[in-house]
Amino acid sequence: MDKKKLIISDAEIPTIVQEKVDLAFTQIYEEEERTMKKEVSD
């Protein structure tokens, strides 16, 4: 197995980083929903 992949797969992501990633995806999805609703109403 590739050593780089092994190291990355074993690395733990800090909780704060995971929370920020989750928040970013939530904001992306919310903006996408607003954009789609706006396009439908136009």
Image (cartoon, helix red, strand yellow):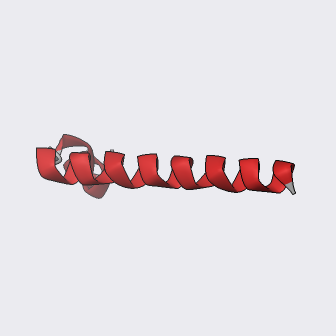
Q: Nearer the viewer, residue 3 or 16?
A: 16
Residue 13 percent coordinates (x, y) = 17, 47
Q: Quadrant of residue 20?
A: bottom left
Could you tell whether 26 is left or right of 14 in the image? Answer: right
Q: Is residue 29 left or right of residue 7?
A: right
Residue nearest the observer in this picture, 23 or 42: 42
Evaluate whether residue 14 shows in this view. Answer: no
Which residue is found at the position 45% from the left and 53% from the top? 27
Question: Viewed as shown, does residue 7 lie left or right of 26?
Answer: left
Write the residue at 24% across / 47% down. Answer: 18
The answer to whether any part of residue 30 appears in the image is yes
Mark count: 0
Image point 84% across, 50% down: which residue? Answer: 41
Q: Residue furthest front?
A: 41
Residue 31 is situated, as x and y percent measured from the top left of the image, at 57, 55
Q: Residue at x 33, y 49 (%)?
A: 23
The answer to which of 1 and 26 lies nearer the viewer is 26
Point out the image quarter for the N terminus. top left
Q: Position of residue 5 (x, y in %)?
A: 31, 51
Side of 41 relative to 10 (left or right): right
- Residue 9 appears at what percent x and percent y? 26, 43
Quadrant (top left, top right, bottom left, bottom right) of the C terminus: bottom right
